[in-house]
Image (tube, rainbow, N blue to C red):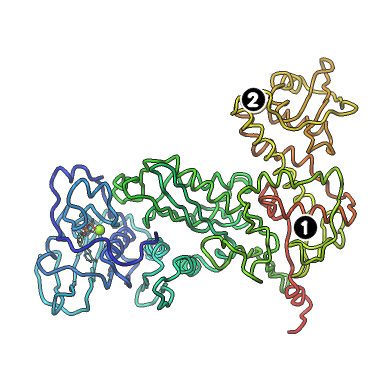
Amino acid sequence: MLNPRPSPQGSRPIRELPDTLISQIAAGEVVERPASVVRELVDNALDAGAGAITVRLLGGGVRLISVEDDGQGITKTQLPIALKRHATSKIADLNDLESVQTMGFRGEALAAINSVAEVSILSRTADDSHAWLLDGGTGELSPGARQIGTTVEVRELFFATPARRKFLKTDTTELAHCVEAVRRHALARPWVSFAIWHDGKLVEQWRPPQTHDFAPDEDAAALQRITDILGDTFRTQSVAVDFQINAGDVALRVRGRAGLPDHARARADQQFAYVNGRFVRDKVITHAARSAYEDVLHGHRQPVYVLYIDIAPDRVDVNVHPTKIEVRFRDSGAVHQAVAKGVLQALSRPRAGSKLGIDMALGHTTAPPVHASPDALVPSPVATSGQNPLPWRNSANGGNRPVAAAHAINEWSQTWGHTEDKAPEDHPLGHAIAQIHGVYILAQNTQGLVIVDMHAAHERIVYERLKAQLTAVQSGLDAGDAAAAMASQPLLIPASFAATPTEIATAQTHTETLNRLGLAIDALSARSLAVRAVPTTLAKGDPVALARSVLGELAQHDASTVITRAQNELLGTMACHGAVRANRQLTLPEMDALLRQMETTERADQCNHGRPTWQQLSMKDLDRLFLRGQ
Ligand SMILES: Nc1ncnc2c1ncn2[C@@H]1O[C@H](COP(=O)(O)OP(=O)(O)O)[C@@H](O)[C@H]1O
Ligand SMILES: [Mg+2]
């Protein structure tokens, strides 16, 4: 869960750990820069059950870091022990270490910080009549004043080690790292309020939702915090993730938000992954999330996401890295699967019909915010009136959509458009009214105007159809059916073409793979090839161009990986050839048929290269263009 209060730290005494246990704990330096101190102190405040945490910094945190909390406090007798190396109240034996639920457990942070800076701790528990102040340098204890809770002050970091101090960057940079450290905590603790001050100015403040509810809405709180920290654009440009695995002794849940492909960034600076409330950088998670974007993200763009993974503490080892930023999963396969499937499923839910508020005022166009389940962290299970005009989006068989799509994508490219006559409001993407320069389709829906890039949209539809077929082929192969292949259609007149020696050699070595892809290509002579059959889905395309590009791809890649690879690039190539070309004039029924297929196709909102396939201009957007009602 998102680890709200109360504290799991409990009220155990702080004790020095036995040597055997010390040697089991990942050793290493935890203090590298001010942000490391901030992270450790905020960890401690959270472990103490704080509901409000204030971080005050001077000079980028180098001159002062003060972390103030309203947690359970430390008693007078315990204060000096807290500063000892390997003294902790959070674990007592190896058993505890294996199922640790607190942020800390190493008992090292305060000692390490005390060795490189001037530390003082002011603390008061509920049983004390006043606070106690411990001077970390001298060990002196004196009475002090404050409410229940703890303030740890860290001054002049690395004052005695100028060499290390030299490695610090400018105050601005160090401050940015400190803020990032708090941000990471805050994203996973929506019920804790955070404030960051720098040189006397309030830099950031995040508050929990006001609620008097006995069963407060966790998802709403999480979404509010995500929005407060990452901005409203992140909320509108992301979709809810919620995926669970319950198999044997593996039980895990992945929740959060995954950014839409359009919203990907040049840098991987908005990828937040949490395991039981702890921010981690983990290869399994990163890879799994990335794989979900595989065929919707172009090149080196980096997806954005906030993912919370909840898993039984004994299925994850947090004692791998001194700063605990790395973890080790016992069931990394299951974690990979849950993240990949969870994100994929979230991205696949078609979003047609949701409002795309394009800011076109004064020609200043920003990325269109797609309002995809804007009000929940998790996908809404039931359609709510008005807010979600998409009956199919919440259909009970939503999970079977790939299969449904494969069937539902009727042979649009073949029949060119049979469609029932319904009122525009019956269809999220509305009814076609015109085509512009053979490139865009204009349609009218309840909100206003829909503009579709017809080539990009159709390419996506063909691609998804091919992919569904290929998945069927693969499961056929898995089931031992050597003959499993994509539906293929023989050409009435084989298409022959002058081929290069490489093309001919490739056609001959990869006959079987080509057949599986629904292609039959054989040599006519030493210099020419003939295409005898093409995938049914692509029957309308140019067989020679298709053959050439597929052979080109096959020549470059290892045959054994081709079927797997076909999932993306190869299929993309094929889809592009099958897709309706720009500049082709379509009839209105043909355009309507395309719109209907988009509505039932997974990921139809982006083309294979991650560009949008359609945009909505609401009546309001249109009014704004004409300064109507202003
Ligand atoms: N803000 C705080 N509020 C209450 N107790 C604290 C706080 N900070 C530290 N402590 C106590 O001091 C001990 C040592 O802290 P630390 O060196 O960070 O080690 P660890 O967090 O790994 O136990 C903790 O186990 C905890 O009992
Ligand atoms: Mg700690």
Q: Secondary structure at mark 2?
A: loop
Residue 205 visible here: no
Front label number (1 vs 2): 2
Query: Which amino acid, mark 1?
Result: Val
**Foreground of the two, 67 or 206:** 206
| Residue at the bottom extreme, as displayed | 630
Q: Is residue 81 above or below residue 463?
A: below
Q: Which residue is mark 2?
A: 481
Which x, y percent locates residue 206? Answer: 42, 72
Tell me what residue is drawn at x 44 percent, y 56 percent: 308
Q: Earlier in the sequence, mark 1 or mark 2?
A: 1
Q: Tell me if the residue at label 1 has its CB under 8 Å from ligand 2.
A: no
Query: Which amino acid, mark 2?
Result: Asp
* Mark 2 neighbour class, 10 Å CA radius: few under 14, some 14 to 19, many 20 or more: few
Q: Secondary structure at mark 1?
A: strand
Q: Which residue is mark 1?
A: 452
Question: Horizontal placement of 275 versus 232: left or right?
Answer: left
Tell me what residue is drawn at x 87 percent, y 48 percent: 416
Which x, y percent locates residue 245? Answer: 46, 47
Q: Is residue 60 above or below residue 393?
A: below
Image quarter (top left, top right, bottom left or bottom right) of the N terminus:
bottom left
